[in-house]
Amino acid sequence: MKSSPNSEKSWYRTWFNSPYYHLLYRNRDEREAERFIHNLLKYLAPDKRAHFLDLACGKGRHSLTINRAGFEVTGADLARENIKFANQSSSDRLHFVQHDMRQPIGESVFDYVLNLFTSFGYFESLEENERVLTAIAKELKPKGKVVLDFMNVEEVTKGLVPLEQMDIEGVNFKITRTNEDGFIVKTIEIEDGDREYTFHERVKALTKEDFMGMFHRTDFEILDTFGNYDLDDFDPEKSPRLILIARKP
């Protein structure tokens, strides 16, 4: 029997809670993530009293690395199952909450807000995605900083793999990727025994110019733009990532 548990417009509500999501992405490069956080902390040089918000934290892998470096961290994610898992590691300086990132968590609470691993662009309109930056502006203390790590749309579009199939622990995944109406769309068809499911990932294809406009309208000052997790300069034709660092007035 085949089912489609998530609509394209609200795909993030069910896909991130699915055990198949975590199975598909189980081999993420943890050393790469730790290297990125190490480079980021070296660049930011935060005071030991700094409080970080890891926005759309998933299961909390970045939150844990920042906390181990000696900082207080709050991780926030919409997916209930992610927060349930992350809370196994919570402590007096490491907190996790289920939260919609379009709404602020308090006002002038955090020194740094991190939105990492393409955890932006989930919503249909530019205005609704911009609401995330409006919420971040409220959450940050004066002169607080936001780090936004997104895909480099030009590089991703150029290297888009249209079809991929894999078998993981007896579960078959068929993945198709398309560029549709300003969105990078990934359709994941799953066969698990006699059960079949279809999920979607749908991320708005935001360019550096789109982000510059959104940051400007939400009164952020862009400080730096990097193109990879070693914080090298951004090259629109070659860089795998688009990492923007901006400051609240």
Image (tube, rainbow, N blue to C red):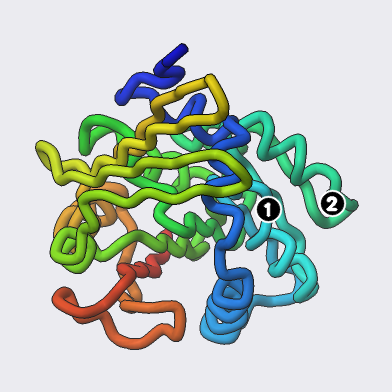
Please give the residue where the numbered disc 1 appears in the rendered image.
60
Among the 4 quarters of the image, the one containing residue 249: bottom left
Tell me what residue is drawn at x 76 percent, y 41 percent.
85
Residue in the foreground of this view, choosing between 60 and 30: 30
Question: Who's the residue at 59% across and 45% down the image?
Answer: 23
Label 2 sits on residue: 89
The number of discs equals: 2
Residue 151, x across and y down, in percent: 31, 61
**Can you give x and y, in whole percent of width and height, for residue 128 in the image?**
29, 32
Per the image, label 1 sits on a secondary structure element best described as: loop
55 and 113: which is toward the camera: 55
Q: What amino acid does circle 1 point to?
A: Gly
Q: Nearer the viewer, residue 121 or 203?
A: 203
Q: Give the vertical position of 168 relative to 128 (above or below).
A: below
Depth check: give the residue in front, 1 or 129.
1
Q: Is residue 159 left or right of residue 104?
A: left
Mark 2 surroundings: few (<14), some (14-19) or many (≥20) residues within 10 A: some
Identify the mark nearer the N-term, 2 or 1. Answer: 1
Q: Real-space Cα distance between discs 2 and 1?
A: 9 Å
Q: Are marks 2 and 1 in contact (CB under 8 Å)?
A: yes
Q: Position of residue 241 (x, y in %)?
A: 33, 70
- Taking the spot 31% from the left edge, 75% from the top edge, the residue there is 225
| Relative side of 91 to 85, left or right | right
Q: SS of the residue at dot 2?
A: helix
Q: Is residue 88 left or right of residue 59?
A: right
